[in-house]
Image (spheres, rainbow, N blue to C red):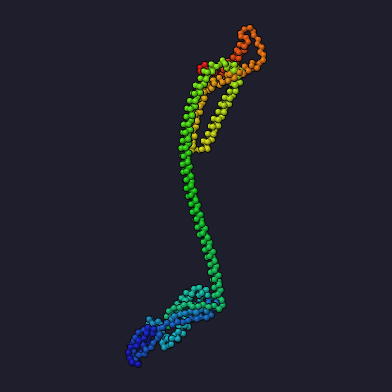
């Protein structure tokens, strides 16, 4: 071997010993000057080694036997001089298989120790914790050999007794139970949310219906106010029309009464010329027709009174049904009716005396006829005279005229109207 430089790759280290070195020179992945014959050069691999750590039938802290298989990555540490020196002391000159075998047995022993200190549930449920403990314990032991544990992973857990299967079944049942509970809770939550949504929807519907009802109420109130105003104006117009019509009728009635008074006055003047001709008729017909006419006038007055009362009651009922909106109109109409009735009463008062005179003149011939009727039917009249006064037909005629002359007194006693004065005044 000639002297010179020696090189190595990054996956190995040079170990130079001999002359000039009190301890070996370690050169990981590089080159060094070597003197042949007086210096010795060796190589050590720095490659990563994969170890399958199998621990069959290990009893846990509960006494349950299980089997565990782990995967470890280890290598000789080339960057740390002390660890590399320790590895050289332990493994220099040995094959890689031998190094792997030593590391494997070390890891397997630590793996079994960790398995014995834990329960099956801990190993099964928390694999990360188990792997961490094996990694830490094995690393502290292998570091003294110059070997670094790059990684450790729990690959498989086996159980020949069916313990893990039971755990799985229990866990499966628990998961199914939790799933059912979760499903029931989700369904209940969905129903609750659906009920809340329905409640909100109904609240919205009720709110919308309330707003619609409120708007409808406002519309009805405004419409009622408008209707009241329209009805009031209409009633005012109607009452104004009726009042004007009543005034017109009153004027017409007054003119008619004046015409009738004039006509009756003229008729009285004509009838005065015919009094002598109708005296006999008045003597026979005046009493009964006068009584009948009195009764007729009383019935007419009573009927007019009842009619006025019924009209007032009907008007009062109409006022009550129309309500406050027509109060003003009814009051105006009542005032107009009162004025009309007053004028009608006044007109009737003025007309009454003329009417009684006319009636008197109409029935006077009938009274005379009624008075003379018994005499006309008598076949024979025997008259007795005392010797003074008229005798015969003149006496009979005088008695009939006396009877007729008593008719004005009878009318005055029944009606209070003095026909004699009225006729003379006319």
> Which residue lies at the image location 49% right of the left edge and 37% below the top edge?
326
Which percent across, then down, holds residue 240? Answer: 46, 33
Which percent across, then down, holds residue 27? Answer: 36, 85
> Which residue lies at the image location 40% right of the left edge and 81% below the top edge?
77
Q: For residue 360, which quarter of the picture?
A: top right
Which percent across, then down, holds residue 198? Answer: 51, 57
The answer to whether residue 319 of the structure is visible from this angle is yes
> Which residue lies at the image location 64% right of the left edge and 16% below the top edge?
376
User: Can you say whether 90 is above or below 339 in the image?
Assistant: below
Tally of numbered discs: 0
Q: Which residue is outermost to the top?
A: 387
Q: The N terminus lies in which quarter of the figure?
A: bottom left
Given residues 66 and 416, the one toward you in this image is: 416
Given residues 151 and 258, the one toward you in this image is: 258
The answer to whether residue 140 of the structure is visible from this angle is no
Which percent across, then down, holds residue 339? Answer: 48, 29
Given residues 202 and 33, the one toward you in this image is: 202
């Amino acid at each position: 071997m000639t002297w010179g430089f020696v090189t190595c790759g990054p996956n190995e280290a040079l170990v130079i010993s001999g002359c000039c070195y009190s301890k070996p020179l370690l050169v990981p992945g590089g080159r060094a000057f070597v003197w042949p014959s007086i210096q010795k050069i060796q190589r050590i691999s720095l490659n990563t080694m994969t170890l399958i750590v199998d621990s069959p039938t290990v009893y846990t802290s509960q006494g349950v036997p299980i089997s565990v298989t782990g995967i470890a990555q280890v290598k000789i540490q080339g960057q740390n001089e002390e660890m590399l020196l320790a590895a050289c002391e332990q493994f220099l000159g040995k094959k890689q298989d031998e190094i792997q075998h030593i590391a494997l047995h070390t890891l397997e022993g630590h793996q079994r120790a960790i398995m014995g200190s834990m329960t099956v549930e801990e190993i099964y449920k928390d694999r990360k914790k188990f792997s961490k403990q094996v990694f830490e314990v094995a690393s502290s032991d292998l570091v003294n050999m110059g070997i670094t544990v790059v990684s450790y992973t729990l690959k498989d857990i086996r159980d020949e007794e069916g313990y893990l299967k039971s755990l799985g079944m229990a866990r499966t049942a628990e998961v199914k139970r939790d799933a059912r509970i979760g499903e029931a809770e989700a369904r209940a939550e969905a129903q609750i949310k659906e009920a809340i949504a329905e409640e909100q929807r109904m609240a919205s519907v009720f709110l919308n219906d309330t707003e619609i009802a409120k708007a409808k109420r406002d519309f009805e109130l405004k419409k009622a106010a408008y209707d009241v105003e329209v009805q009031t104006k209409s009633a005012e117009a109607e009452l104004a029309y009726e009042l004007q019509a009543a005034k017109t009728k009153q004027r017409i009635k007054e003119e008619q009464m004046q015409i009738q008074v004039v006509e009756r006055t003229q008729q009285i003047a004509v009838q005065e010329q015919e009094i002598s001709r109708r005296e006999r008729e008045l003597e026979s017909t005046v009493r009964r027709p006068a009584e009948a006419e009195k009764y007729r006038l009383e019935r007419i007055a009573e009927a007019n009174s009842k009619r006025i009362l019924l009209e007032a009651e009907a008007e009062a009922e109409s006022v009550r049904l129309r309500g406050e909106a027509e109060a003003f109109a009814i009051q105006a109409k009542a005032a107009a009716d009162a004025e009309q009735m007053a004028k009608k009463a006044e007109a009737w008062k003025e007309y009454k005396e003329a009417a009684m005179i006319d009636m008197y003149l109409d029935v006077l011939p009938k009274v005379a006829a009624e008075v003379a009727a018994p005499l006309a039917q008598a076949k024979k009249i025997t008259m007795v005279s005392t010797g003074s006064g008229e005798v015969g037909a003149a006496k009979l005629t005088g008695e009939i005229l006396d009877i007729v002359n008593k008719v004005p007194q009878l009318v005055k006693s029944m009606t209070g109207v003095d026909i004699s004065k009225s006729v003379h005044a006319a």
